[in-house]
Amino acid sequence: MNDIVIHGTYFSSINRDEVITCEGYLICVDQTGTISRTIAPCEDDFNTVLQEAKQSDRLVELKDNQYILPGFIDLHIHAPQWPQAGLALDLPLADWLNHYTFPLEAKYQDLEYAKMVYKDLIHELLSQGTTTALMFGTIHTEANLVLARQSAAAGLRAYIGQVVMDNPEQTPEFYRNKSTQEALEANEEFILAMQELAKQTQSTLVPVITPRFVPSCTDETLAGLAKQAKQYDLPIQSHLSESDWEHNYAIERFGLHDTEVMEKFGLLTDKSVMAHGTQLTDSDLATLHHKQTAIAHCPISNSYFGNAVLPTKKILRQGNKIGLGSDISGGYSPSLYYNIRQAVKSSQMLEDGVDSAQPAQSRGVKSSRITMANAFYLATLAGAEALHLKAGKIAPGYQADLQIVNAHPALMNLSQDDIFQRLMYQTERSDIAQVYVG
Ligand code: GUN
Ligand code: FE
């Protein structure tokens, strides 16, 4: 039995290069919130299913200027940093962390503050078409559970990490775990509470092992977190070779690349998602590929802190796992549309190069530009695959995580591909008419 039937035209990635257009289809959603069937207008029972849904008041009929897309998967976002989105992005990463980010995150000891911010952020994400988010919280267990409860109440699929940071050399006293033992015990408490909450609310709420990044963690803590990930079979998230500074820090402390450090401690698994990676070498990428670890590409954030452009095209070609993240607040926008646009723009700048004093022939990195279809894939199907979540695609068996968007008026004849491109470039929050999660 269908719970609802949506009638309209949709766009969906079927692989990294191809987006299909299905015109005037029916999307049947069952009572568990899963897409049970998609029906083309030419199929025998199209009219019967349409009429039945209409008569039982279960039909959602799209207007002529409306289109259906899968909900977006934000693969890297710092929930507590929402109040400072767009602040101090002209500072280098380490200064931005010490002078803005750590003092802000320390405030989440105050649960009233957490409730206020997290409610606003979750509403914002859903309104921007994001239906799943892989989030960093703070070091505070209670505030992280506020984020979880509010996500479940609003319907956002939430993968949430309790941030762990205990290295006194790289973290301020006012915002640091007191010891490895304290950090691991609090983390275990968080994991168990999240699992209980997921059961109670019947929601997608997943605890994520979250060493902030190599500089902020002691060796014992990195090892202990890997052990917890294994014990509870959990996803892992962190930052990886995000900037020259971060990349060189690992070399100075361990004589190894960030990737090799993560590997050494057992933090690279097929459930790991590592943000940024702008300084990754070919051998680092080969390691991530071998481990089936995903990269969360955060192109807006990388423009400020990355010190380089991630070679997204090469990474896709090599078959590494990769999705898209907003990195609020290293990135200023919670909209994955904005990040999709920036991913395409940054890749073109990588291909062309940016210094006109250099000869055109050697200015850029050849064959670096990605297509809009590539970027859309990162924000949908690829992100879901990194989380082992059956979502991000409009097809039977996938979660009915959907957004209905209003296209801007077309003043000329447009092909379906043109319409898709314009939707990607022009959609604003106010154009998103409806968002469904399951
Ligand atoms: N590296 C360590 N912490 C952070 C953070 O909060 N944001 C970004 N962009 N990079 C980090
Ligand atoms: Fe980040």
Image (spheres, helix red, strand yellow):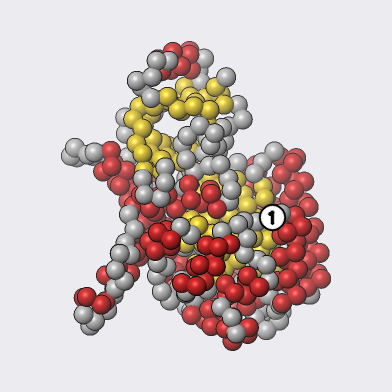
Name the residue furthest left.
412
Q: Position of residue 188 (x, y in %)?
A: 78, 59
Total labels: the figure holds 1
Nearer to us in this view, 150 or 7: 7
Viewer-side residue, 131 vs 391: 391
Q: Quadrant of the N terminus?
A: top right
User: In which quadrant is the C terminus drawn?
Assistant: top right
Residue located 67% across and 84% down the image: 169
34 vs 423, left or right, is right
Q: Is residue 166 above or below residue 322?
A: below
Tell me what residue is drawn at x 28 percent, y 42 percent.
417
Residue 349 visible (yes or no): no
Identify the secondary structure beneath mark 1. loop
Q: Residue furthest bottom?
A: 252
Residue bearing mark 1: 234
User: Is the residue indicated by label 1 positioned so its CB lies within 8 Å of ligand 2?
Assistant: no
Q: Amino acid at mark 1?
A: Leu
Q: Residue at 75% across / 55% down in the picture?
A: 232
| Quadrant assignment, res 139 | bottom right
User: Is residue 396 among what the camera can see?
Assistant: yes
Picture layout, residue 427 above or below residue 42: below
Query: Residue at coordinates 53% horizontally, 83% vertically from top-left?
Result: 248
Residue in front for this viewpoint, 211 or 388: 388
Describe residue 242's horizontal placement relative to residue 372 as left or right.
right
Query: Is 234 situated above or below 70?
Result: below
Measured as percent of width and height from the top left, residue 64 is found at: 31, 29
